[in-house]
Image (cartoon, grey):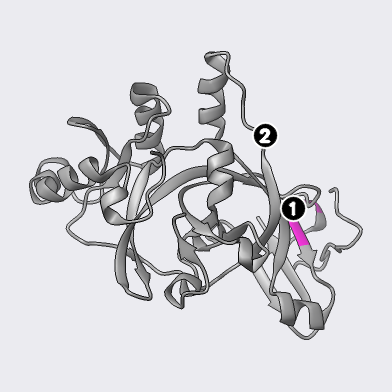
Amino acid sequence: MPVNSDFKVNIGYPGTNKEDQPDQVVVKPDPDALAKDGSTLEVEVHVTDRHAKILEDNDKNIPSPQSGKGLIDTGASISAIDVNMLQKLDISPIGATKVSTPSGQATQELYAVKFSFPGKGLPDMTSLNVLGSNLKKQDICALIGRDILRHCLLVYDGTSGSIMLAV
Amino acid sequence: MKMGEKDNELALKNEIELYESNKEEWVDQYGEGKFVAIKGDAILGPYDSQEKAYEEGLNKFGLEPFLVQRVSKEERVNHLPALELGIIHAGK
C-alpha cells in the first residue's frame, strides 16, 4: 500500500489478519500538530465518474481535480468544499438541504463530487451531499463530514498524535 | 447561475418549490423515503436510492442543475458546527 513518508500505517488493526486489513492510513504522528491543526490530510476533489463520462462522450474536457488540505470534521453531518473549487470544476447543483446557520435555518444547494486521497492508499469516495462554503480563510479546501466517514473507521489518538482512517 | 448564496438566488429554486408544494401527495404516491429527480416540471422516479436518481437525472437532464430529492414528510436539517458558529460561510 503506497503511504506518504510523513505518515505511517497502523499494522496493528485489531481483529483482522494483515492481508484482510482495510485500506488505512495514520496521519499526524505529532500530538501538538494534531491538537493545533486537527485531523487534516491532502485531498483531491474531482467531478464524479458519471459526470466525467458525459463530458468524455461529448468530446469535452474533464476539469482537472482540485487539491488542498481536507479537515476531518466528525461534527459535520455532510461534507463541504470551497466554492472556488466548485467553480473550477464547473459543477451544477443536484440537491438542496436545510442547514443551520448563525441566523437560523437556510436552504443551501448540494453538489456531487468525488474525493481522492493521493498517496494514502485509500479508495476514492463519492458524495452527492456536498455543500459549497467559503473555506479559504481556514486554510483548508474541504471539510470531510459524516457522509464520507460513514464508510470509514476513524481512530483519533490524541496521546500519540495520530489519526487512523480506514475504509 | 450555478450556485446560490441566498434562498432567492438558488439555481434550483423552482424545483425546490415544486417539491415543497407536492410533498404530501408524493409521499402517498411514491412512498416515504423514495427519491425523485426534478428539472422544471419534469419529474423522474420514484427510485430506491439517491445514487439511482442522480444517475437517471444525468441521463435525462445532462449536466444542467436538477434536484435529487428524498420524498419524505420528515424535514432533515444538516448540521455543520463550523457553519453554525459562523467560522465558515455557505455560498459565495
Above or below: residue A132 compared with residue B18: below
Residue found at x 58% / y 62%: A135
What SS does tag 2 mark? loop
Residue drawn at (80%, 70%), measured in percent from left and top? A28
Q: In which chain is the residue bearing label 1?
A: A
Q: Element at badge 1?
A: helix
Task: Tell me if B57 is positioned left or right of A92 in this view.
Answer: left
The quadrant holding residue B51 is top left
Horizontal and vertical percent for residue B23?
14, 49
Nearer to us of marks 2 and 1 is 2
Magenta highlight range = A19-25
Mark 2 — residue? A64
Crowding at dot 2, Cα within 10 Å, few <14 / some 14-19 / many 20+, comes out as few
Most distant residue in the right direction = A5
Q: What's the amino acid at mark 2? A: Ser
Q: Which residue is mark 1?
A: A20
Is residue A23 part of the magenta span, yes or no? Answer: yes
* Residue A102 against residue B39 in the figure, above or below: below
Q: Is residue B23 above or below residue A34?
A: above
Q: Quadrant of the C terminus of chain A?
A: bottom right
Residue A54: x %, y % from top left: 50, 21
Q: Is residue B9 left or right of residue A138?
A: left
**Which quadrant of the structure image shows residue B49?**
top left
Disc 2 with disc 1 on a shared chain? yes
